[in-house]
Image (tube, rainbow, N blue to C red):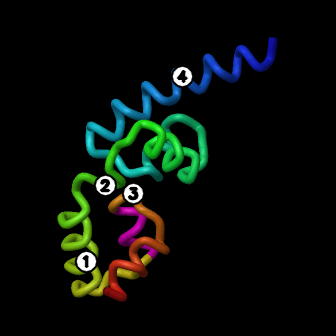
């Protein structure tokens, strides 16, 4: 019986993840909403065949702009709802 609950729970998560991704939220923001890890949201996104971040160029521009304004990586990450590692990766490009 527990397996059936898990399948039902996953179906609900997938539907909710689709809606949240389409609204433009990041994996980190969605993870906080559904109570899962951001990597699980990424797995769901892959299962759904959806793009990683529809606003990728916009996010990169925001990260670079905020960094030029003197904001720390962790502050940028919190402000934009992405991981600090993602901010670091964008700044290295």
Q: What element carries label 3?
A: loop
Residue at the spot x=47%, y=52% of the render?
28
Query: Residue 66 bears which disc, if any?
Result: 1
Q: Element at badge 1?
A: helix
Q: Earlier in the sequence, mark 4 or mark 1?
A: 4
The answer to whether residue 70 is above or below residue 5 is below
Report the number of discs.
4
- According to the picture, the residue beneath numbered tag 4 turns out to be 11
Q: Considering the image in quadrants, where does the N terminus appear?
A: top right
Report which residue position mark 3 lands on.
81
Q: Viewer-nearest of labels 4 and 1?
A: 4
Q: Is residue 61 left or right of residue 25?
A: left
**Cα distance in 3D space between marks 2 and 4:** 22 Å
* Chain part drawn in magenta: 74-79
Dots 4 and 1: beta carbons under 8 Å? no
Residue tagged 2: 53
> Residue 91 lies in what quarter of the image?
bottom left
């Amino acid at each position: 019986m527990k397996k059936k609950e898990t399948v039902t729970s996953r179906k609900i998560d997938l539907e909710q993840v689709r809606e949240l991704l389409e609204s433009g939220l990041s994996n980190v923001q969605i993870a906080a909403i559904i109570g899962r890890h951001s990597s699980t949201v990424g797995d769901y996104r892959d299962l759904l065949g959806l793009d990683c971040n529809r606003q990728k160029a916009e996010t990169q521009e925001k990260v670079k702009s905020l960094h030029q304004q003197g904001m720390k990586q962790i502050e940028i990450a919190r402000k934009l709802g992405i991981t600090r590692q993602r901010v670091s990766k964008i700044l290295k490009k």
